[in-house]
Amino acid sequence: MFGSGWNETDVPDLDGVTAVVTGANSGIGYEATRTLADHGATVVMGCRSVSRGADAVSSIRDATPSGTLDVRELDLADLDSVASFATVVNEAYDGLDLLVNNAGVMAIPYEETADGFEYQVGVNHVGHFALTGRLLEGLRAGAGVPGSAADARGPSRVVTVSSALHERGDTDFDAVEGGDGVANDYDRWTAYGRSKLANLFFAYELDRRLATAGASVRSFACHPGYADTNLQARGPEADGSRVKRLAMRAANALFAQPAAAGALPTVYAATAPDLSGGEFVGPGGLFGMRGAPEVTESNELSLDREAATELWERSEAWTGVAYDLPEAR
Ligand SMILES: NC(=O)c1ccc[n+]([C@@H]2O[C@H](COP(=O)([O-])OP(=O)(O)OC[C@H]3O[C@@H](n4cnc5c(N)ncnc54)[C@H](OP(=O)(O)O)[C@@H]3O)[C@@H](O)[C@H]2O)c1
């Protein structure tokens, strides 16, 4: 037995909890959505394809009749789409209790978002930065997720899904801004690592700012270890490489844990009552790649507050979304 032994049966009753999950139609997002719904939550599924979202709803409905599922269009590679999604959600729901920043792409060829950002950091970090800022008021108005006392609700939560590959990331924030120079120097794994390091800078800095503000919202980070999802196929697909695609599939079959197990750190960060804010949750087993979730550690660079502040300020400028939060103490 690895890690805490915590599993889906330990998730508290989520009746009355309203959650938003990005990338909810596939992999970790799909499994997290299924689990949250199975425990009674209402889940707004932010999907870039509404039809793939609807397919996911029918499949979740085969697994559980519980919870309410609401598919809404969200393309994190387009800040106008992020703004429209947030408007729709803010109008439809009086308060939000949970936001899971999960959607992501990995190691794809160079591309830019609609707003000109390098695509991996653009989707994985910039889009989620804008989304969280636009949903913050709703989260502050939420009743929160169940707390440690059986009859009490704790703070609302923002959970951002990072990766063990944050260790490959750097603080070259100029490279986020795209353009010919960035395209020429592009290394797809460095860009992915940069996006996942940015997820950690954001999650930790958000928690510090929320705590300084005394807000009834806290922020957490997590990573799924190595889980068998569609993530690994995207790069080879974009390259049109059948050989690389088959190699990725074979590696997944041999070494990855199922997507449902990979979603447990996300669900733990979203619902476990013994967390207070700012923790990083990952699988507790073999090399942090599989097993039951537990609080773990990210690398030294991810804890650099100066870099986190710089990324925060640049993200506000990039997105035009200014958070109503004081600088962290
Ligand atoms: N699987 C792993 O081993 C692993 C390891 C470390 C970290 N992670 C992280 O886990 C998260 C979930 O990935 P996954 O493994 O579940 O991969 P996945 O099965 O490929 O799911 C990714 C989700 O993100 C969505 N997405 C991609 N681009 C988007 C965009 N522009 N706007 C909105 N949604 C978009 C995808 O939508 P479509 O279905 O429409 O493409 C899909 O729903 C990612 O943040 C990833 O970095 C995964």
Image: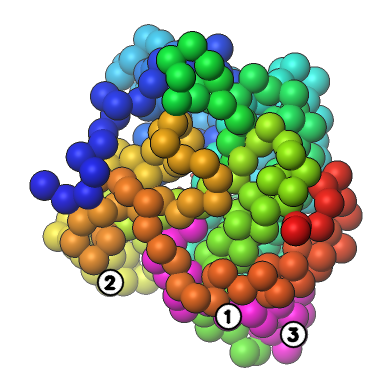
Q: Mark 2 or mark 3, which is nearer to you?
A: 3
Category of crowding for the residue at label 2, using alpha-carbon neighbours closer than 10 angstroms: few (below 14), some (14–19), many (at least 20): few
* Amino acid type of the residue tagged 1 in the rendering: Asp
SS class, disc 1:
loop
- Distance between the alpha carbons at the discs numbered 3 and 1: 20 Å
Q: Residue at x 29, y 52 (%)?
A: 283
Residue 66 position in % (x across, y down): 40, 11
Category of crowding for the residue at label 1, using alpha-carbon neighbours closer than 10 angstroms: few (below 14), some (14–19), many (at least 20): some
Residue 242 covered by magenta stretch: no
Residue placed under numbered mark 3 in the picture: 180
Q: Residue at x 67, y 53 (%)?
A: 208
* Amino acid type of the residue tagged 3 in the rendering: Asp
Residue placed under numbered mark 1 in the picture: 170
* Amino acid type of the residue tagged 2 in the rendering: Val
SS class, disc 2:
helix
SS class, disc 3:
helix
Of residue 171 and residue 252, the one placed in the foreground of this image is 171
Of residue 92 and residue 299, the one placed in the foreground of this image is 299
Q: Mark 3 or mark 1, which is nearer to you?
A: 1
What's the mark number on residue 243?
2
**Contact, CB < 8 Å: mark 3 with mark 1?**
no
- Label 1 CB-ligand 1 distance < 8 A: no
Instruction: Indicate the quadrant where residue 191 lies.
Output: bottom right
Sequence-wise, the earlier of marks 2 and 1 is: 1
